[in-house]
Amino acid sequence: MTSSDDQRDHIESEATEWLVLQTAGRLDPADARLFEGWLRRSAQHRAVYERMRQTWDALAVLQWAPGDLLRHTADLHAKPRLPSVARRWLAPAFAVAACLLLVIGLAAAWIGNPVTALVADYSTAPGEIRGVTLPDGSRLELGPASAVKLHFSATERRIELLGGSAYFSAVPQAVATGRPFIVDTGMLSARALGTQFLVERLPRGDGVAVVEHAVAVTMQRSDGDPRMAVLSPGQALRYRPGRRSEPDMASMNPLEIAPWRAGNLVFHQVPLQEVVAELNRYRRSRILLTNDDLSARVVSGVFRIGEPDGALRMIAQELGLHVAALPFVSVVYK
């Protein structure tokens, strides 16, 4: 590690200590003067502290979206500050609330979205991959931070993908007493016309990719007129209503669909925002990007799913970015 790295780490450590003291309302007038003097030491001191402050504010997002902390937090600091007297009264309450949010965020990071986990029949935590045999004999492989709910009946085999990624090896309809095998995501419905396929429900949109035979996909459009497509092996689509009415179609090597099943993460010209969202599904702590400019940077590479921290470091180095590790959060900045 270079001397500049040591200096940056030292400043980050001091900034964290000042942030904890300020948030807990433990800065008396003498401490406040010391803190102001520390900020004036250099532009780097002030910049590091502001970044830490933004990260602290962004922790509140963990309460509802532990896997989707990719948002620009600078606008949080454009709001007028409360008078010093009000801040003095509110600081203890804010510190308690922040601690509660942190506890909720930690629980969510370990077990996934707690609300989803309660209603799901099968679910996985961040970083976990799970194989399940369904009541009809079909096989389900759940990717990390994923969940499904079963709606099997005498007339159909319907599965609701509540979030994440799921790879299906479906027992043919003829074998399952004529009951169709259907996977719903909310935005689309995938009906198996064969056996193996992938369905995803992710922030970047819902998707289907076919490995064997075919899948009939029905997409719900905002105009109420459904869009339909039949995918053959090696075909995939990504659909996100509200941004565009037509799905993104792609051709893929069937062997490269759901690379997480082989322990890999594969990115080809993927925006950094989407890469971070995927990495967050494999980490107990979250990754934050400090601004929207970083979100659009493009990433290509193959990484092991068991080493998401190493993947983050390699990506940051390749893009000329830095990673600041805070408790439970890693901040990516330029």
Image (spheres, rainbow, N blue to C red):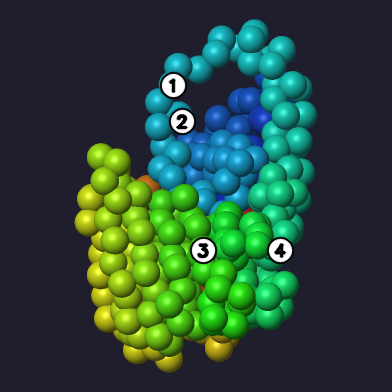
- Please tell me which of labels 1 and 3 falls first in the chain: 1
Numbered circle sitting on residue 255? none
The span from disc 3 to disc 4 (Cα, nearest Å) is 14 Å
Q: Disc 3 or disc 2, which is closer to the eye?
A: 3
The span from disc 4 to disc 2 (Cα, nearest Å) is 37 Å
The span from disc 4 to disc 1 (Cα, nearest Å) is 42 Å
- Please tell me which of labels 4 and 2 falls first in the chain: 2
Q: Can residue 4 be seen?
A: no
Q: Is residue 56 left or right of residue 272?
A: right
The span from disc 3 to disc 2 (Cα, nearest Å) is 39 Å
Q: Residue at x 64, y 10 (%)?
A: 86
Query: Which residue carries the number 2 mark?
Result: 76
> Is there a contact, CB below 8 Å, between mark 1 and mark 2?
yes
Q: Can residue 246 be seen?
A: yes
- Please tell me which of labels 3 and 4 falls first in the chain: 4
Query: Which residue carries the number 1 mark?
Result: 79
Residue 159 x, y percent position in the rendering: 58, 61
Query: Which residue carries the number 3 mark?
Result: 183
Residue 211 x, y percent position in the rendering: 42, 85
